[in-house]
Amino acid sequence: MKRLQLEDLSKQLGYSKTLISMVLNGKADQYGISKKTQAIVLDAVSKLDYTPNKFAKALRTGKSNFIGLIVADISNPFYSTIAKNIEGTLFDRGYNLMVCSTDEDEEREKKLIDMMINQQGVDGIILASTFKNADYFNNPRFTKTPLVFIDRILPLFNGNFVVTDNYGGSKEITEALIKKGCKKILCLSITPSYISTIDDRIKGYTDSVEKHNLNLSDEFIVPINFNKIQEDTLSALKKMFFMHPDIDAIYTLNNNLASATLKALKDKSISSYYDKVQLACFDDIELFNLVDKPILSVSQPVDDIGRNATLLTLDIIDGKKENKSMIVLPTSLIVR
Amino acid sequence: MKRLQLEDLSKQLGYSKTLISMVLNGKADQYGISKKTQAIVLDAVSKLDYTPNKFAKALRTGKSNFIGLIVADISNPFYSTIAKNIEGTLFDRGYNLMVCSTDEDEEREKKLIDMMINQQGVDGIILASTFKNADYFNNPRFTKTPLVFIDRILPLFNGNFVVTDNYGGSKEITEALIKKGCKKILCLSITPSYISTIDDRIKGYTDSVEKHNLNLSDEFIVPINFNKIQEDTLSALKKMFFMHPDIDAIYTLNNNLASATLKALKDKSISSYYDKVQLACFDDIELFNLVDKPILSVSQPVDDIGRNATLLTLDIIDGKKENKSMIVLPTSLIVR
DNA sequence: AAATATGCCTAAAAAGATTTAGGATTTAGC
DNA sequence: GCTAAATCCTAAATCTTTTTAGGCATATTT
């Protein structure tokens, strides 16, 4: 059974393809098609269940109604939650979502962006970019397809961003620790790849620590290698506890570090500290509700990131917004 | 700057559009284009960085090179991990992934399937369907676009499935509990929506329990309402512990129930059981590594589900496989 | 009464690729 | 040296829509 197409409809109704197309695309009034005719067409279309061929439409209009999402890893709950929100928001507006993961690989990211724009012809891209700077994006070809960056910032780049207030949130949680009486706060950071969010969180921590004259040297910010996070965390903790037995809090800059820390604190060599230190983490995950230890955290506005990024992207596509916006969303402190 | 198109290339090279198209689509040999000409064309194409217009190509061939993925909730780690695998496998084959969530809503699922096939023209759909039976899918329109079902089975339906061995895995973990000496094993199940996986897991449990003559009535299988999982779990546990203080194991049929159980066991009213009962769970999650209590589990072959489903889908599209395959993947017991 | 405007609609072009059907050369065979 | 076959390539049709430019009545203006 062949798919119904405009031509068939045209023959059946006795109206031209042009007219039917106009009615279907809401341009009937603009071209002065009578209300009566419009009703007849719409009625037939819904009765016969006609849907325009997507490819022909895209070929003619140059619009795919696809939005691309590029993140480091779609299986990461943080990103998959954002994906869920984006998809929901897009669906209501007649758009669809295409997702890709970069695995933090710049080359792969380049390929994906290229493929999305040149091969798939997406109408916009939302991305948590792995890139360290904006050189690659200072290119005229990105003016046609709008890019909206989420989560991570590209310094010195005048583009579209929807991000968490990493600095503010980090400051708030550090202050909360201090208010609780903590004085020797160990900060676990992440390496090797540069990510703007981590930078901002470190700044929030140090500013807060300095403000309260806690006298914590840079030694208290320990970078953990992401690729061997578990062993690195354990050895870092061992070393730091040995040199500073009076550490009374551990603040991890992301949730992976918090999990690793929880696990490491079960190791015989340092398990005596398990009850002694206060834990804090940037980012809030379900795990924290299920563990004995109360963990202080700031939760990121995941839902808002997805929704805001989507609306911004669509607004730019529709020409309702300029191609340069920065949206910073607040975190909320979760006291446990 | 206008995009390069076949016509331009044709003029520059002095070969027809046909020839260039043939070379680009790997049909040059088939049509007897000389190797020398092929090389010239390929060279020019890569030098000039020409990529065919996706929409024109799709219109002509009727192929979108998109595969759709429909799951209940893409933010669920189980599904997002599968999505990651699918996407990776697809990318290598020149396909892209489009994702949608149904929120366990049959009507929405219908709409999504319809949209994917009729509006977006995907070449295949991988879905963890919310449907209870196959009536909807016994329809000729699904022979053109192949459907591959994952995770959940539709009874009495002769289609494509890639699923976990829920029955076998459940049997194995129950046997493991019994071997450990557990005799009164409480089984927490889920309600209200019917899901085939849960059915199979229950069967595995009861068969194993009967085989060892444990004499556990149906009362020991308690359905928990998914929508108020936390309060329901707590009250169920209270009631069961009150009536059967000798319960020595709790087997939860999914990971949400395990989390809820862990939390409930912290409640003062039943916390005395925390150290007494052995926990077991169908599905293995990172949380289990971070909690004090050793939790027995069976892990699902998430990676294999994604990869197998993808390969099967592409094979059907390429006509290499019949449109009817059932792949059952084994679980693995994780002893803690 | 001719010219202009208005209301409603349509034929044909355009979007950019793939595929069909077939046209020139060149080579092979006798 | 002629024909048949093989080799290499191309013009034109096709896919299905949107959009441009304009046609044809009827109504209104001068």
Image (cartoon, coloured by chain):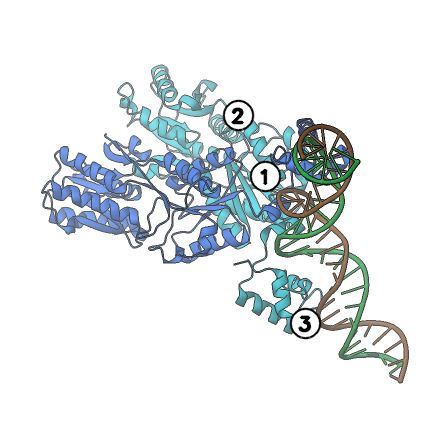
Chain colours: A blue, B cyan, C green, D brown
In the image, B78 versus B60, the foreground residue is: B60
Secondary element under disc 2, as helix, strand or loop, is loop
Residue hosting label 1: B116
Q: Which residue is mark 3?
A: B34
Tell me which amino acid carries mark 3. Answer: Ser
Residue A265 in sight in this render? no
Q: Amino acid at mark 1?
A: Met
Query: Which badge, 3 or 1, is on the more N-terminal residue?
Result: 3
Task: List the residue tagged with mark 2.
Answer: B194
Residue B38 vs B287, above or below: the answer is below
Say which amino acid is labelled 2. Answer: Tyr
Residue at 28% of width from left, 22% of height from top?
A: B267
Q: Residue B161 at what x, y percent from top left? A: 58, 39
Question: Residues at marks 2 and 3, common chain?
Answer: yes
Pointer 1 indicates a residue of which chain?
B
Chain on which label 2 sits:
B
Q: Callout 2: few (<14), some (14-19), or many (20+) C-alpha neighbours within 10 Å?
A: few
Question: Is label 1 in a helix, a strand or a loop?
Answer: helix
Is residue A6 rendered to the left or right of residue A276? right
Image-based side of B223 in relation to A151, left or right: right
Cα–Cα gap, marks 3 and 1: 41 Å
Eyeballing the image, is B226 above or below A179?
above
